[in-house]
Image (cartoon, rainbow, N blue to C red):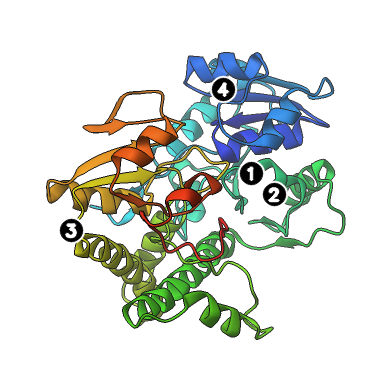
Amino acid sequence: MKIAVVGTGYVGLSNALLLAQHNEVVALDINDEKVAMLNNKESPIEDAEIQEYLNKSTINFLATTNENTAYSNADFIIISTPTDYNEITNFFDTTTIETVIERVLRINPTATMVIKSTIPVGYVKTIRTKYQTSNIIFSPEFLREGMALYDNLYPNRIIVGEKSDRARVFANLLKSGAIKKDIPILFTDPTEAEAIKLFSNAYLAMRVAYFNELDSYSEVYSLNTKDIINGVCLDSRIGAFYNNPSFGYGGYCFPKDTKQLKANFKGIPNNLVSSIVDSNSTRKKFILNQILKGKPKEVGVYRLIMKAGSDNFRSAAIKYVIDGLKEKGIKIYIFEPVLDVDDFEGMEVINNIDDFKMKSDVIIANRVSDELKNVMNKVYSRDVFGSDK
């Protein structure tokens, strides 16, 4: 099949390379530099499998900035453009999706458009009516940063928001590119698929918030967080996974998806969904206050990225902490090898780890690595398992 993929972030690029194993795939992006890198077999994002697959000679893949090259004669057009949460409207900003739809309808109106971007519940029905086309479906993604292609090669499920022949064709395209066998496939109506995406991420965010609150309690009463979590998670109904405390959840998905679900609940009685959002805000404030109690003068921030293997700073919980420290006039140093600058938002970037450790009287780290082990007396972290999860 001929497939166009719009957007070359984690979602778009991982789907493009998955499908390029057995199909002709053209990836469209507005960024000339990213397009050049991809055509030179260089990944613009941190993801080991994406880089590995770009180097494969069997991949039928081209990147372009030309819409006609991408859309003309395409059977499926996958839309994976950003949908940031708008704090004023309390909804995702779907402008980029609609821009793509309008241009596809002009160039190739018979193509089936598959939205992979995260969208509000009820969006597909609304957008089909707006553009008077049935050629729009939704297929949610469930990918981790830094492991996006891996999660496409070994998916825990494939969901397509339509019960039709073309939905089955698309699901089989995803399945045929995967290495994992016996993948559960679910076909639903579009609104149910949209709800699955948001409720899935809200549940995971709730789990993060739960163990963070457990840790807040433990820290205040000087209890051993690790022992308590281990004891709780020995219950097979709970399980020993996704349980490592942090400064709060962040990243591309959880902050905006939980807020969107909360907005979708307007007029519907709820406590839990709203509390997930509130709990994360409370946790970040708690972490900031715990750091300020020590009255630090020079604070080193060890990594802005969410986790190892990522290059994403978006909505990282540590940014809230940084802003709070800056408001108090505290000197801040940043250690972040992903940054190739000397200054980040008015803070000195020190990418020599020894200099960074020497200058900082307190080092805050959402996740601790071996290079901090010799200065643990300076480190404030709630990482009890040494894991990204």
Residue 76 in view, yes or no = no
Q: Which structural element holds mark 3?
A: loop
User: Circle 3 sits on which residue?
Assistant: 295
Mark 2 and mark 1 residues within 8 Å of each other at the beta carbon: yes
From the viewer's perspective, is 9 left or right of 62?
left
Q: Give the residue type that dot 4 points to.
A: Ile
Query: What is the spatial separation of the Cα atoms under label 2 and label 1, in whole angstroms?
Result: 5 Å
For label 2, the crowd category at 10 Å Cα-Cα, with few meaning under 14, some 14 to 19 and many 20 or more, is many
User: Circle 4 sits on which residue?
Assistant: 107
Mark 3 and mark 1 residues within 8 Å of each other at the beta carbon: no
Query: What is the spatial separation of the Cα atoms under label 3 and label 2, in whole angstroms?
Result: 43 Å
Q: Nearer the viewer, mark 4 or mark 2?
A: 2
User: Circle 2 sits on which residue?
Assistant: 151
Residue drawn at the location 20% of the way across and 65% of the way down = 293
Mark 4 and mark 1 residues within 8 Å of each other at the beta carbon: no
Q: Which structural element holds mark 2?
A: helix
Q: Tell which of 228 and 255 is nearer to you.
A: 228
Q: Give the residue type that dot 1 points to.
A: Ala
Query: What is the spatial separation of the Cα atoms under label 3 and label 1, in whole angstroms?
Result: 40 Å
Q: Give the residue type that dot 3 points to.
A: Lys
Give residue 342's position: percent from left, percent from top. Answer: 31, 24
User: Circle 1 sits on which residue?
Assistant: 148
Q: Give the residue type that dot 2 points to.
A: Asp
Which is more N-terminal, label 3 or label 4?
Answer: 4
Mark 4 and mark 3 residues within 8 Å of each other at the beta carbon: no
Q: Quadrant of the C terminus?
A: bottom right
Residue 27 in view, yes or no = yes
Which is more N-terminal, label 2 or label 3?
Answer: 2
